[in-house]
Image (cartoon, rainbow, N blue to C red):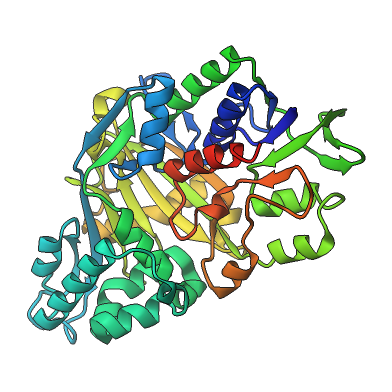
Amino acid sequence: MKIAVLGGGFTGLTAAYYLQKKGHLVTVFEKETVLGGLAAGFRVINWDWYLERTYHHIFTSDSDILSFVEEVGFDRFIFKEPVTASYYRIIPERFPHLPAGRQAFPVDTPQDFLRLPILSWPVKFRAGAILAFLKLSPFLSVYERQTAQDFLTKTMGKEGWEILWQGLFRKKFGKYAENILAAFIWARIKKRTKTLGYAEGGFQTLINYLEKKNTSLGIDIRKGSGVDKIIKSSKFKIQSSNKTETFDVIISTLPTPVITKIGEDVLPSGYVKRLNQIKFLHAVTLILETEKPILEKTYWLNVTDEKIPMMAIVQHTNFMDKKHYGNHHLTYVGWYVDNNSPLLKMDKEEVVNFVKPHLRKIFNFHPPAGGPILNSFLFKAPWAQPIFDKTFLKSKPNFITPVKNFYIANLDMTYPYDRGTNYAVKLGKEVSRFL
């Protein structure tokens, strides 16, 4: 069969690989001039390695991508144990035993939680027990019948929710934080490992490898060729770059709001209306290149303080060696934001100026932490984070649509797990089994 795969990220490239091996004729459409989707990377003249536009790593439990790269012959993953920490504001009324101000605490292991001075001993023990339970527990239907706030408050107490989790959820999900299902926190704890993996050369190196692999198999990969419209007659007609072609099967890996728009003449209106009920946040990522590290030892710093308008600071060069990036340090500052966020309207310099005073506040340092900013990069990704609430359960897409031979395999379907390359690969492989 002649198959069109829409989207050239990990899901699309994986699906194309398995479909071509089955003997189908596969064409991959990608609107960007580089493949990779949310995992795409870039490189400047003094860097040996690519860097992702948004921070990426895998866990040692990510068996789907690890088995896939072994199958295709890419054996260049590096595994390390970087430090993860959370940054809290110390309020004297709540924490009289601690000096006022802001402080970061490591949160990598159960032992780290037991040492957290911001939690009382009863809450520490309750939190440790529940985290261990979530780690060992299979998925239970009860996780979809209550919110994470309800579950964590019942099991860890109000103190546990307010101090340990509330800030994390609000920074990731904004105004939707209290509506997120407990399934999300189960999945986060279940899959997380202390040891993290990274593709040697950056994930773009793996993407480039898959591009060559797929092309050698005869797959037609069209970069810079977005799909404008899908028309259904006896077969599917795709309008792309002022050209119309016919295909037997369509597999869309595009974001849900995109496929409902370009496929509105093919997909039933009721189905489109259902998918359009899903709510999303957009990702904004600022990358700072500096001579000195902004974070001394920590790789990933969750910023829970509501007075600091950042979600996370990720010091990439505390994970991968700075020698691959011209001996400079690279730091991500990340946000998930809704449609009304001023960040979506700011240009790069405006975002840098927005960030500087908050970095000074965090690190009690008058000049920008890390020293002078040598270079900066700003990336914005729409529809990057679906809202895992009760509406999502009723609205999320599945592989099979109401239209015969029209399939969807996009990152909204990683639920209850968070988005990542592992689940992108898994979706690509699974959708190929329908044909």
Residue for point 49% across, 58% down = 415
Locate residue 191, reporting x and y percent. 32, 53
Is residue 280 in view? yes
- Name the residue rendered at 25%, 24% in the picture: 323
Q: Nearer the viewer, residue 22 or 48?
A: 22
The C terminus: image quadrant: top right
- Between 42 and 111, the residue placed more toward the observer is 111
Q: In the rendered view, tell whether residue 177 sits above or below residue 224.
A: below
When asked about the image quadrant of residue 280, the answer is: bottom right
- Drawn side of residue 214 relative to residue 184, left or right: right
Answer above or below: position of 419 versus 133. above
Rendered residue at 44%/78% (across/down): 147
| Above or below, 269 relative to 119 | above
* Left or right: 416, with 344 as reference point: left
Horizontal side of 132 relative to 74 (left or right) equals left
Q: Residue at x 23, y 39 (%)?
A: 318
Locate residue 360, reporting x and y percent: 28, 56
- Quadrant in the picture for residue 19: top right
In terms of depth relative to the viewer, which is nearer, 236 or 344? 236
